[in-house]
């Protein structure tokens, strides 16, 4: 075991202190520099403007390197928006149920007491409505428990408004022949307007004077306003559009698709 005398130990201690002092003095600039860096970091991290720019750059660089994530985000957003739109439609259908399914001015075809109701928003100048008309006829003929509600929705110009106004007047004057009138208008080629609608009305035996008196009644236009308000709440902006149960179906969807939805609604109601 090595034994140091106090004088020797004292001398070593003095030398060590001197050496430590020299090291500290040599490192002082570095320590000062590190302290400055730490202070700068603190200032930057407390600067919201700097952090915003930094985060924007990080996000931008990431998106440039991974552009496919934009498509993923768009798909997610569209899915959420579609889900929200469906939820809003279901809510609106419940709130406006009486106006949708039981409005007194709407014509009803098929079985008035049917267990499934289809509501159609239509325009006499809508090509897809005319294309879908045979589908409606086939469904009514095939399904004796189907109730079809027709909603005037003249959105394709003044000619459409005029033609639908004549239709409403004819429904007042000759309600028993309204289905024949509607069928004739749907099958008639060319653009529907007041003149063409009056021709159809007179061909079915309507009295001209009675038609003129009915047409003078401004209240004939009220169903158009009501149907427009309902359509707005349901986000319906084109024809044809159908409401079946709590679903809104747009476009000429075809017989098979409608039959499937009718079956689903019938099962849901059981």
Image (spheres, grey):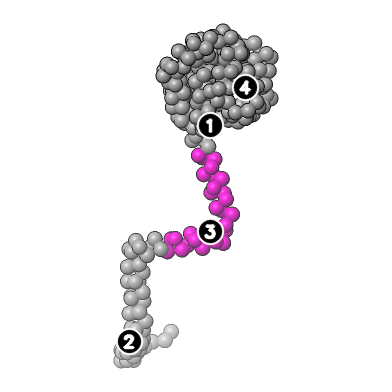
Specify start and end residues of the magenta stretch as a single range: 54-81
Q: Are marks 2 and 3 in contact (CB under 8 Å)?
A: no
Q: Position of residue 166 (x, y in %)?
A: 51, 19
Q: Residues within 10 Å of mark 2 (few under 14, many from 20)?
A: few
Rounded to the nearest whole Å, what is the CA distance between mark 2 and mark 3?
49 Å
Q: Which one is earlier in the sequence, the residue at label 2 or at label 3?
A: 2
Which mark is drawn over residue 76? Answer: none
Q: Which residue is labeled 3 in the image?
A: 63
Rounded to the nearest whole Å, what is the CA distance between mark 4 and mark 2?
100 Å
Front position among marks 2 and 3: 3
Q: Secondary structure at mark 1?
A: loop
Camera sees residue 66: yes
The quarter in which the N terminus is drawn is bottom left
Camera sees residue 117: no
Q: Position of residue 71 (x, y in %)?
A: 57, 50
Q: Residue at x 43, y 24 (%)?
A: 225
**Nearest the camera: 114 or 104?**
104
Q: Which one is earlier in the sequence, the residue at label 1 or at label 3?
A: 3
């Amino acid at each position: 075991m090595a034994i140091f005398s106090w004088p020797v130990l004292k001398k070593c201690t003095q030398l060590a202190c001197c050496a430590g002092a020299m090291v500290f003095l040599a490192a002082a600039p570095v320590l000062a520099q590190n302290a400055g860096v730490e202070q700068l970091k603190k200032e930057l991290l407390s600067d919201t403007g700097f952090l915003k720019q930094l985060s924007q750059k990080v996000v931008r660089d990431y998106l440039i390197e991974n552009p496919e994530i934009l498509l993923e985000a768009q798909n997610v957003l569209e899915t959420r928006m579609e889900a929200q739109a469906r939820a809003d439609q279901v809510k609106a259908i419940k709130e406006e149920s009486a106006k949708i399914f039981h409005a007194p001015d709407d014509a009803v075809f098929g079985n008035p007491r049917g267990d499934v109701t289809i509501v159609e928003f239509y325009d006499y100048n809508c090509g897809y409505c005319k294309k879908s008309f045979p589908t409606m006829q086939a469904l009514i003929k095939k399904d004796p428990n189907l109730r079809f509600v027709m909603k005037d929705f003249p959105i394709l110009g003044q000619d459409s408004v005029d033609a639908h106004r004549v239709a409403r007047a004819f429904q007042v004057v000759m309600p028993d022949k309204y289905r024949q009138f509607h069928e004739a208008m749907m099958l008639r080629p060319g653009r529907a307007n007041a003149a063409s609608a009056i021709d159809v009305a007179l061909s079915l035996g309507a009295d001209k004077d009675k038609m003129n008196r009915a047409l003078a009644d401004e209240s004939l236009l009220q169903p158009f306003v009501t149907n427009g308000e309902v359509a707005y709440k349901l986000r319906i902006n084109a024809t044809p559009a159908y409401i079946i149960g709590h679903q809104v179906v747009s476009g000429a969807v075809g017989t098979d698709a409608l039959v499937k939805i009718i079956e689903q609604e019938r099962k849901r109601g059981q």
